[in-house]
């Protein structure tokens, strides 16, 4: 399908995977709503909603930068209303914004527990809720949530219960919406990377340069996301996709171009 003139609402789109998806769709002439908190640049993270919007425009898309803290339902509604006012509707929602803290129970402070639940779970739920009335009017509406397949192996719980709870809740929202919205022709799927992805989170929180060099670039997730939301919403719904499997099913088997260090060892991501 053509994304020219289609409106894609992306949370956490000022950097990393969210921005990579935005730029991939900008090349197709899409309208991109860059919804994130970053209005001033953090040297450790890089990027703001304004710098991302500029890159999107330069890539061929149309951008709307909206400051939005998805923990606040009023800001969510204001961002959605502004997107519809600017572009006339919403065709795709990408639930990308997420918080991470890989801490055990004793080291997980209440404020960190609440932050992850407020962004990952509550934010995903209420952002989806706010977009649904507009997605119902689209000819091929998709919700795509960046969260892992449900895996009850206890190794994914024992070291970071709080984080695992939130990411699995995001996936349950995605799968639940697929069932709830099927009759309206709205697709809902989850997407997760096979390997770690070279983002600020990996750099600053997980493994520094060593892990970055064992990761793939965000473009692999962006290309997989593009493939998923290009499919008919009536048939492509209720899935927990893995990025490289999506691309391989599309006939793309050479994934070396996505490696930070081509030919190097890759580190498998969490939950797989």
Image: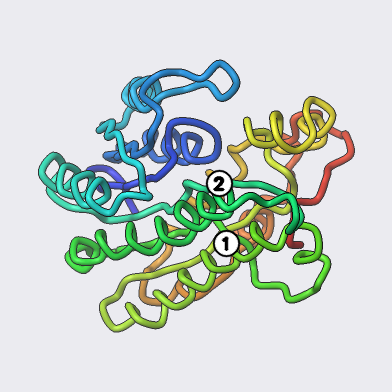
Residue 258's x, y, as percent?
69, 36
Residue 233 seen anywhere in this rendered image of the structure: yes
Rendered image coloring scheme: rainbow
Q: How many marks?
A: 2
- Which quadrant is home to the N terminus? bottom left
Residue 188's x, y, as percent?
42, 68
Query: Vertical placement of 260 versus 166: above or below?
Result: above
Q: Along the line of sight, which residue is nearer the eye, 70 or 7?
A: 70
Mark 2 or mark 1: whose residue is earlier in sequence:
2
For label 2, the crowd category at 10 Å Cα-Cα, with few meaning under 14, some 14 to 19 and many 20 or more, is: some
Q: Are marks 2 and 1 in contact (CB under 8 Å)?
A: yes
Residue at mark 1: 166
Determine whether the residue tagged by mark 1 lies in a helix, strand or loop.
Answer: helix
Query: Vertical placement of 188 versus 254: above or below?
Result: below
Query: Vertical placement of 24 versus 208: above or below?
Result: below
Q: Residue at x 28, y 31 (%)?
A: 65
Image quadrant in which you'd find residue 251 = bottom right
Residue 174's x, y, as percent?
47, 69
Determine whether the residue tagged by mark 2 lies in a helix, strand or loop.
Answer: loop
For label 1, the crowd category at 10 Å Cα-Cα, with few meaning under 14, some 14 to 19 and many 20 or more, is: many
105 with respect to 184 (left or right): right
Query: Vertical placement of 163 versus 7: above or below?
Result: below
Q: Residue at x 73, y 59 (%)?
A: 105
Image quadrant in which you'd find residue 149 = bottom right
7 with respect to 17 (left or right): left
Residue 63 seen anywhere in this rendered image of the structure: no
Q: Along the line of sight, which residue is nearer the eye, 77 or 255?
A: 77
Residue 82's x, y, as percent?
16, 42
Q: Residue at x 63, y 49 (%)?
A: 109
Residue at mark 2: 99
Image quadrant in which you'd find residue 150 = bottom right
């Amino acid at each position: 399908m053509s994304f020219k003139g289609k409106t894609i609402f992306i949370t956490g789109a000022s950097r990393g995977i969210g921005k990579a998806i935005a730029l991939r769709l900008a090349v197709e002439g899409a309208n991109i709503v860059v919804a994130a908190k970053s209005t001033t640049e953090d040297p450790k993270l890089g990027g703001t909603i304004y710098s991302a919007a500029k890159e999107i425009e330069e890539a061929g898309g149309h951008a709307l930068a909206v400051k939005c803290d998805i923990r606040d339902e009023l800001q969510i509604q204001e961002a959605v209303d502004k997107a519809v006012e600017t572009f006339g509707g919403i065709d795709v929602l990408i639930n990308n914004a997420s918080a991470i803290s890989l801490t055990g129970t004793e080291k997980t402070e209440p404020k960190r527990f609440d932050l992850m639940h407020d962004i990952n779970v509550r934010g995903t739920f209420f952002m989806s809720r706010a977009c649904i009335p507009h997605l119902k009017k689209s000819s091929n509406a998709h919700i795509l949530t960046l969260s892992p397949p449900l895996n009850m192996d206890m190794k994914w719980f024992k070291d970071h219960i709080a984080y695992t709870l939130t990411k699995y809740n995001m996936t349950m929202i995605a799968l639940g919406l697929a069932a709830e919205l099927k009759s309206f022709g709205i697709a809902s799927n989850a997407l997760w990377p096979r390997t770690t992805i070279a983002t600020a989170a990996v750099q600053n929180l997980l493994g520094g340069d060593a892990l970055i060099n064992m990761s793939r670039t965000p473009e692999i997730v962006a290309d997989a996301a593009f493939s998923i939301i290009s499919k008919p919403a009536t048939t492509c719904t209720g899935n927990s996709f893995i990025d490289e499997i999506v691309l391989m099913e599309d006939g793309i088997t050479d994934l070396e171009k996505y490696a930070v260090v081509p030919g190097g060892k890759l580190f498998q991501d969490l939950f797989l």
